[in-house]
Amino acid sequence: MAHKWWQKAVVYQIYPMSFQDSNNDGIGDLPGITQRLDYLHQLGVDVLWLNPIYKSPNQDNGYDIADYRTINPQYGTMADFEELLAATHQRGMKLLMDLVVNHTSDQHAWFQESRKSKDNRYADYYIWRDPVDGHEPNNWRSAFSGPAWTYVPERGQYYLHLFAPGQPDLNWENPEVREAVFNIERFWLDKGVDGFRMDVINLISKPAGLPDVAGTPTAGTTLDFVADGPRLNEFLRQMNDEVLSHYDVMTVGEMPGSTPEDAIKYTGLDSHELNMVFQFQHVNLSPNPDVRLGKWNDQPVKLPELKVALNRWQKALDGKGWNSLYWNNHDQPRAVSRFGNDDPKYRVLAAKMLGTTLHMMQGTPYVYEGEELGMTNAHFTRIDQYEDLESLNIYREMVKQRKLVDGPTMLKYLANMSRDNARTPMQWDAGKNAGFTAGTPWYRLNTNYPEINVDAALKDQTSVFYHYQKLIKLRHQSDLIQYGTFEELDPLDEQVYAYRRHYQGQTLLVMSNFTDQVVQRDSGQQKADELLISNYPDDQGTTLRPYESKVYLFK
Ligand code: GLC
Ligand code: CA
């Protein structure tokens, strides 16, 4: 297969609400992004992905869309969007929209009609079921706590929502729904956007008959049960035939619970559905041993487990599919805090080490806003510092209602895993509100912004920013980094993550020390032709200092 543009690309994810405010209302916006394009261009990224910017009541910060063709006024106007798109293209970058079509907002006109009766034009746009013995139609749980069903007296029925009650699931079995989604895609593609990140796209086809999940379901087991439904392939293929194949675009499908086998099925290099998926195996490591608590835990990830997760995808997709590479996004805690070390003594080293470990793999790397600065978790200690409905609901459910953990313990879990860690405003400078807004920010800032910010990073040649810039440049220049096959080394090593890449007779050796210890490792690096990148000023051969990471080239 001929190589595609997105196989050479590095993507930068922007959380518009928290990126840059331009009109002092405390909320990031589209003109704010436009103002910062030169910064992103300087970093060297090729593609920008915007989290949802459509009209939305923001119960789930835009993942509840009330109108797919209107820009949320808090972000600006359609003219602002068109200006941002043109300015992005002028700089040779591309732009992806977030497409959230497993569900809409309950404020969407389709749902407002659908809920009124069983025989209106939109009656069948959502998944409605009669009560069973006066109860929910099945035992599925919502990803954001509580049952996955809500009763509507007007219809005398329940509707399905795998996420919040304000996020009713669309009925993809209805051909009119599919056509409506395809028209939304055409609307944005005709404006010139370069593709889509598709939200929880592997949930759109539900298991026939909507049977119970075995045992006592949790949010996690419900999603696993629903994922990868019987008609998913068919729906994605139809989308590709009717829409995507008519444009030169990039698509990445968010697929919780997907395996490499699923990914090959949906993104195979010779298949015609999506280009790549976001898998979750590495970010779902170290769950709570009490399954009822799901991901809520405060334990670090063990390095051999991390390698199993990432190496498996590297090996399985080689030559068959294409990986997306990420540590961070708006749903994950900050990588340097979770997988590295955010102690000021090690933060910069660890952030660079993580960047190197990921960016030297095969796939398309994604950088989440602030990751290129080594932004850290927020280390909140009180529940009123949280904002996200997932965190607030889980605290209420586990501490107040079910009393499975005490408050202080749950706060530790939130500090480690909450999505809010990723959503504090971008840190631009050491001034008021980190330069994010001159008004009152919609969400509190991380208190470390006087030290960790763009301004400081750009003035310091040894900053995380310049390390990421170099990683991106290396990828752009090297077929070996883009396409080389992956060879794992020492999977059981608990301290060092090492691997090789091979392409047309050349070899790359990557060695990353994930600990604050000095260790000795010999993977033949002394015979290398070149040290391509490292996070220390000198090379001490077989010695790896705390969080040291080095990449060698063998010609
Ligand atoms: C995806 C999004 C997340 C959202 C959920 C429901 O996982 O990334 O932010 O809450 O879908 O739309
Ligand atoms: Ca604003």
Image (cartoon, rainbow, N blue to C red):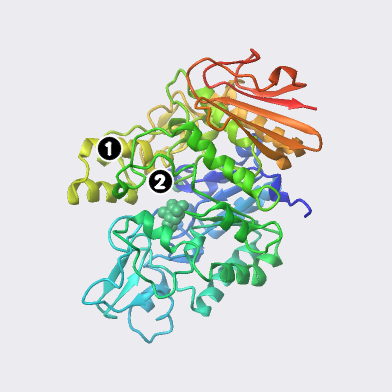
Query: Can see residue 252?
Result: no
Q: Residue at x 49, y 46 (%)?
A: 281
- Quarter of the image for residue 213 reads bottom left
Q: Residue at x 48, y 58 (%)?
A: 200
In percent of width and height, residue 144 lies at: 33, 55
Element type at marker 2?
loop
Residue assigned mark 2? 25
Crowding near pointer 1: few (<14 within 10 Å), some, many (20+)? Answer: many
Q: Residue 199, relative to residue 403: is it above or below? A: below
Residue 106 in the image: above or below residue 338: below
Q: Nearer the viewer, residue 505 or 451?
A: 505
Quarter that holds the C terminus: top right
Residue at the location (54% across, 36% down)? 307
Ligand 1 quadrant in view: bottom left
Q: Which residue is mark 1?
A: 411
Quarter occupied by residue 79 = bottom right
Res. 504 in view: yes
Marker disc for residue 341 = none
Q: Position of residue 450 (x, y in %)?
A: 43, 24
Q: Residues within 10 Å of mark 2 (few under 14, many from 20)?
A: some
Q: Is mark 2 within 8 Å of ligand 2?
A: yes
Q: Nearer the viewer, residue 314 or 102?
A: 314
